[in-house]
Amino acid sequence: ASGAHVPVLVIGTGYGGAVAALRLAQAGVDVHMVEMGMAWDTPGSDGKIFCNTREPDYRSYWLRTRTKAPLNYFLGFPIDRDIPRHTGILDAEEFGGITVYQGRGVGGGSLVNGGMAVTPRRENFGAVLPSVNADEMYGVYYPRANAELGVGTVDPAWFDSTACYQYARVGRKHAQRSGFPFVFVPDVYDWDYMEQEAAGTVPKSALAGEILYGNNHGKKSLQQTYLARARATGRVAVSPLHRVTSVSPAGGRYAVAIEQLDTGGGVTATKTVTADRVFFAAGSVGTSKLLVKLKATGALPGLNDEVGRGWGDNGNVMCGRANHMWDATGKLQSSIPCCGIDNWAAGGAFAEVAPLPTGIETYASFYLSITNNPNRARFSWNAATGRVDLDWQASWKQPSITMAKTIFDKINAKEGTIYRTDLFGVYKIWGDHLTYHPLGGAVLNRATDNYGRLTAYPGLYVIDGALIPGNTTVNPFVTVTALAERNIERIIAADL
Ligand code: FAD
């Protein structure tokens, strides 16, 4: 309620926010989490909480009247369709040079993502988070994050026999024939459940094409892990459909301005609460936008000049390859990827073998590559529009394409195959207009101290992907989680 006071307010319910809430509650602190998206705990009229990738409806997108599918063409035809404007689960947030996909709702990105739970190779960690002690991360915090998130790996024998990973076995064969290291990729999806889906004994999710707009079964999102344990402490309250618009000092505390939203995106109430401590966990983009606005508009003028800088796209780029008729990828494809091609050391690219769960045979191999793209963008306040801009340029994806080609040009040459040109437009090979992995904007040890403190304002912290300077060499959420575990442990010990 407006006027209330809480000891700790957490902005956002993704990985960083969920870790902070659980650990603070376990330390005996009452926590209030504020989330702009919906709760995602109530079925719609079809009995399901989440809609399917093949039938996107009002639940699919955050306040859009037309879908904006990451893979927006098929066989050269646009596949987007009209939808009612609703506080749906996936935000395709458009900046000048890039569309940034993010989850909206209690659980943040864990609601929409593929669950790929990858710990970076240790030899790469120094470039990911240079100011963080790698021994501590690999000895304590990565194992802690993996255990709490429920990370597991596909059973290799089942992988070799199941129809739903034929596409991945084709990906493996092509990778290995070209001499690339092929790796299984861990995931938070319940692998036993997926085997039961294949056996036909449980309702299908991964094998029904569910992904991007939520999984009704099988995936261990934060709702099932960190947030469930946080709520079980009895000390954590969550307010969905509430969006934080301001944080400012108020007599030794912080005043937090919040808008309550309806499911059409309209503001139904504005509230102000006070908090002793505020954790920014609104995701790389959400946290960066808030901090940049608050610094520029005078609410938090003492934030340093690193705020808004160091943003990267984790080098994301997508492409498809057209296989020969003898390399069918299967009409049944598990929507949960489970393997990848690791050419990071030689070519700067790690490519996950991704599904195209269309339900028909496509003869396509599809890949999301994470590349060592060096470009970094900056968020800045645009007083004329009252919005925060990001100066990423479309051409900045070229290094990613060059790195991805170190894998796929070689495979195409070896297999006598070509790139698909019908997945991202008319005659367009590269999906280079988007990222799933926004990182940075309030970088650790630059915008904050080495534990996420915004030192000009005691009691304000950043604890999400905004801390990570633009790239993790692999899918990011395990690193976001492990870093949050490290930082909150120190904050609880030293600051409370
Ligand atoms: P988020 O998880 O983004 O959480 C931030 C939360 O804050 C959101 O719920 C948001 O609604 C809320 N919020 C924002 N602003 C405000 C505000 N002003 N007031 C209140 N609430 C606010 N990563 C992997 O490691 N493996 C994968 O397989 C993978 N697949 C992905 C697939 C897709 C389609 C997408 C979009 C992402 C994927 N990711 C994957 C990325 C991963 O989900 C993110 O890196 C991760 O969620 C970031 O965690 P976070 O805590 O920084 O923020």
Image: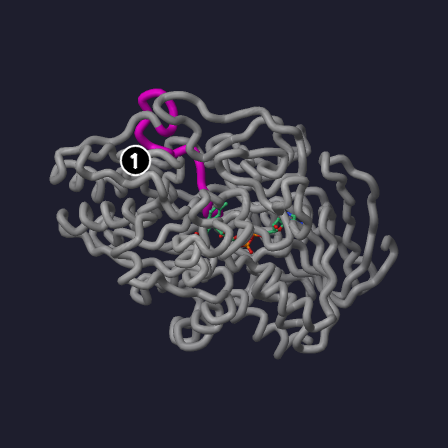
Q: Is residue 18 visible?
A: yes
Horizontal placement of 398 versus 151: left or right? Answer: left
Q: Dividing the image into 4 quarters, which one contains the N terminus? A: bottom right
Q: How many marks?
A: 1
- Amino acid type of disc 1? Gly
Residue shown at 76% from the left, 39% from the top: 262
Read off the residue under disc 1. 320
Pick the residue in front: 83 or 305: 83
280 shown above or below 148: above
320 shown above or below 227: above
- Residue 251: x, y in percent? 83, 62
Q: Dividing the image into 4 quarters, which one contains the C terminus? A: bottom right
Magenta-drawn stretch contains 425: yes
Residue 318 in which image quadrant: top left
Horizontal placement of 365 versus 488: left or right? Answer: left
Q: Examine the residues drawn in magenta and state their main secondary structure.
A: loop
Furthest residue in direction right, as rendered: 3
Residue range in magenta is 423-438
Q: Is residue 299 visible?
A: no
Horizontal placement of 328 versus 69: left or right? Answer: left
